[in-house]
Structure formats: C-alpha cells, structure tokens
Amino acid sequence: MNRGIECSIIDFSTRLAERQAEKDRQNEIRLRMKYGDFRYEIAEEVADRHSRTAGPAPEVEEILKMMEMTGW
C-alpha cells in the first residue's frame, strides 16, 4: 500500500473517532442537563451492568426515557 494513502486512512479513521467522541460528549452534556447528574449516573450504571449480560446493551438515553415514563 502506498505510504501516503496509508497515512490518509489512519488520519481519516482518527478524525472519525474524534468526531464520534465529541458527539458522545455533547449528547452526555445534553442528557445531564435534561435529566440531571443523579439520574444520568444511575442510568449509566444500569447500562454498564446490562452490557455484561446476553443481548444488546441498552443505551443510557433509553434508560433515562424509561425512568421518566415511570415517574422516577
């Protein structure tokens, strides 16, 4: 593979990862502002615990929506 192309691919993948990290950070800030730090941290812990079980891991945002629907 051409060295220039290889560097471009690495740069591109690094930029994509950085862009996704920034998007995730902005989403976390938005959710913390909407639901509060306390609820966000609980939802984050629930998502982490469930990520170690079979099946797809739930998203923090979905957990927060369920908490809101149940009045918690």
Image: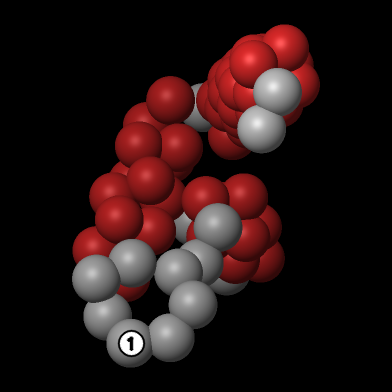
Image height check: is 58 above or below 13?
Answer: below
Can residue 54 be spotted in the picture?
A: yes
Residue 67 appears left or right of 15: left
Q: Which of 28 and 69 is in front in this view?
A: 28
Q: Residue at x 50, y 67 (%)?
A: 58
Q: Residue at x 41, y 50 (%)?
A: 43
Image height check: is 36 above or below 48?
Answer: above
Residue 58 appears left or right of 16: left
Q: Position of residue 40 (x, y in %)?
A: 45, 37
In the picture, residue 30 is in which quadrant?
A: top right
Q: Mark 1 points at which residue?
A: 54
Q: Which of 13 and 64 is in front in this view?
A: 13
Q: Where is residue 1 in the image (x, y as percent from the top left)?
A: 66, 32
Image height check: is 28 above or below 48?
Answer: above
Q: Give SS at disc 1.
A: loop
Q: Which residue is drawn at 35% across and 37% down?
A: 41
Residue 29 appears left or right of 60: right
In the picture, residue 34 is in which quadrant?
A: top right
Q: Nearer the viewer, residue 66 or 24?
A: 24
Q: Where is residue 59 in the image (x, y as percent from the top left)?
A: 55, 58
Q: Which of 37 and 17 is in front in this view?
A: 17
Q: What residue type is labelled 1?
A: Ala
Residue 47 appears left or right of 31: left
- Residue, far bottom: 54
Can residue 26 be spotted in the picture?
A: no
Q: Where is residue 45 in the image (x, y as percent from the top left)?
A: 28, 50
